[in-house]
Image (cartoon, rainbow, N blue to C red):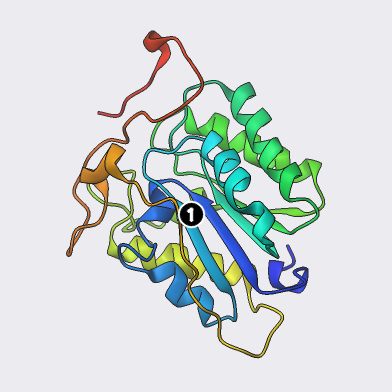
Amino acid sequence: GEPLGRNAEGTRLLLIGDSIFASPSSRYGNEMCDTLTQLGWNVAVEAEAGSFVNFGQKVLRNRFDEGWDAVVVFLGTNFDGNAANYETRLRDVVETVWPLPVLLLTTGTFRSEQADVNEVIWAVRDSYDHVTVLDWSTILETGGLLSDDGVHLNRNGRKVIATAVGRALQFAPTDQPGTCLDSRFRDDSKVKDAMPSADEPAADAPAESEPPPVDPAAETTLP
């Protein structure tokens, strides 16, 4: 598809995500901001480990009125198995930011339920002209991007995901370098053991966060 930068009217970029976006944020390696500011974007990364899709709605309630020009969303690593609820909430995120260009990322298929998540993401893309998809799931097939838990990014993975997002966005409509904007959502305590250390992230399963109520028997945890 056409890079988002050609459809954005300005340079303010909001990224919303879970641990996969938290690890390359400013409180760890800062790969995302370092990469995207070189393309002219003014970048805010709002990502917390353990976040479910409703985190996207929470961030938008808090920050959307500040004025943005494009939005990138990676939410789906933490999934309660309710695809209908996931789709409803993801569509709400996409419709809230309309007509801004939106980039959605597919998730890794570290468990069978993630195929349901990715199916919804592609369906949402097909429903809205302002949505494009970065197929992160396919990029992961090259290997060497994840920590030992098979879910979270290692150092190489953090560099690659920032580069992949940059290629999907390409240049912001400006001749000036961008800046890193402050983030308000910085609590990774739900899965702190999985977040990057000074060297590599430790292996740990994503913890449950604040999903809508579900039958505890239906909750999935990783080995």
Relative depth, front residue between 204 and 70: 70
The amino acid type of the residue labelled 1 equals Glu
* 206, above or below 143, in the image: above
In this orientation, does residue 162 appear? yes
Relative depth, front residue between 18 and 186: 186
Q: Which residue lies furthest to the bottom in this view?
A: 175
Q: Is residue 149 left or right of residue 46?
A: left
Total count of labels: 1
Position of residue 111 measured from the top left corner of the image (x, y, whole percent): 40, 31
* 142, above or below 164, in the image: above
Q: In which quarter of the image is the N terminus?
A: bottom right
Assign a secondary structure to mark 1: strand
Relative depth, front residue between 68 and 149: 68
Residue beneath label 1, please? Answer: 46
In this orientation, does residue 141 appear? no
Residue, x 43% and y 76% (percent of image)? 34
Q: Is residue 10 left or right of residue 50?
A: right
Position of residue 191 measured from the top left corner of the image (x, y, whole percent): 28, 40
* 74, above or below 217, in the image: below
Residue, x 71% and y 45% (percent of image)? 94
Q: In which quarter of the image is the C terminus?
A: top left
* 137, above or below 205, in the image: below
Q: In this view, does 39 lie to the left or right of 161?
A: right
Q: In this view, does 92 lie to the left or right of 109?
A: right
Crowding around mark 1 (Cα neighbors within 10 Å: few <14, some 14 to 19, many 20+) is many
Position of residue 101 measured from the top left corner of the image (x, y, whole percent): 73, 59
Residue, x 43% and y 46% (percent of image)? 18
Position of residue 202 measured from the top left corner of the image (x, y, whole percent): 18, 49
